[in-house]
Amino acid sequence: MSAAVVQGAPVVTFDTDIWLDLPPRQYMRAANLCLKLGATMRANTVFVFQNDLIVNFLYAVTGLKNFDSEYQAVRHLNWIGLRRVPILRLERIYHSKSVIRRPKDIAHMPLLKQLIVCEKRITGKKRTPKRTATKAVVR
Amino acid sequence: MFVTQSKSKVMDKRFERILSLIKNVPGLDEHERILFARSLAATPTQRWQIHNNVLRSLVLSSPSVRKRFAI
């Protein structure tokens, strides 16, 4: 839900999910990088940084297409000092949650839907996906 | 969150504009409209700072709470 928070969802979440496009043999690369940056490993994919930032790495997201397909429609935002961070659009987050349907996902869905409607009223235009290549997307 | 006066004025103007744009969104009461407009008027970094402030105000980011949730 961090991606939704950054796009204006008035909700609170504990962790930031980062979707990585890595083959299974390279999963340790992300873990090693976090450890090198001083993070504490809580689980195979969960790391807690000194500033209380909790990062969870995902290698596939239920309900979404493959990484490359989804990346074509991401939104780039400047966030926590980083430039052009690729972030999943609200529509795709909503779609993923509508497929996963855990209780917390179902609870978030009406809010996301309202936010999407509000955003459409503000922008007043249809979005056009951009084509570029990268290795990570915030979910 | 530290927001300078000029930035705050810009945010207030954006807030007013967004509030007027979403006034007819179905399913939102007045309180929710203000909440959404406030959130949408902020920049992504400001939104993240607000989110962290809320998390801290609820004492949800303390080590003991994280331990309880096994994170």
Image (tube, rainbow, N blue to C red):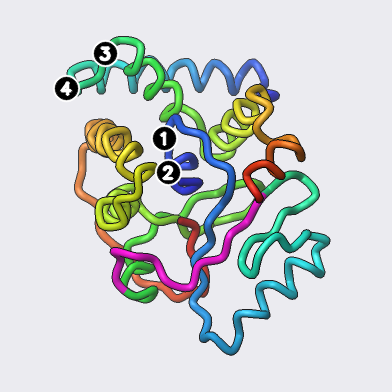
Horizontal and vertical percent position of residue A97: 31, 51
The residue segment tinted magenta is A54-65
Please name the amino acid that badge 3 sits on: Asp
The residue that disc 4 covers is B26
Q: Earlier in the sequence, mark 1 or mark 2?
A: 2
Residue drawn where x is 39% and y is 73% of the image:
A67
Q: Nearer the viewer, residue A123 or A40?
A: A40
Marks 3 and 4 sit apart, C-alpha to C-alpha, by 8 Å
Q: Are marks 1 and 2 in contact (CB under 8 Å)?
A: yes
Q: Classify mark 2: helix, strand or loop.
A: helix
Q: Residue furthest front?
A: B68
**For the residues bearing labels 2 and 3, Cβ distance under 8 angstroms:** no
Residue B33 sits above or below residue B60 on the image = above
Q: Chain of mark 2?
A: A
Mark 4–mark 1 distance (CA, rounded to whole Å): 17 Å
Q: Which residue is mark 2?
A: A4
Q: Is residue B53 magenta?
A: no
* Amino acid type at mark 1: Ala
Q: Secondary structure at mark 4?
A: loop
Residue tagged by mark 3?
Answer: B29
Residue at image position (79%, 68%) is A35
Q: Are marks 4 and 1 in contact (CB under 8 Å)?
A: no
Q: CA distance from mark 1 to mark 2?
A: 5 Å
Are discs 2 and 3 located on one and the same chain? Answer: no
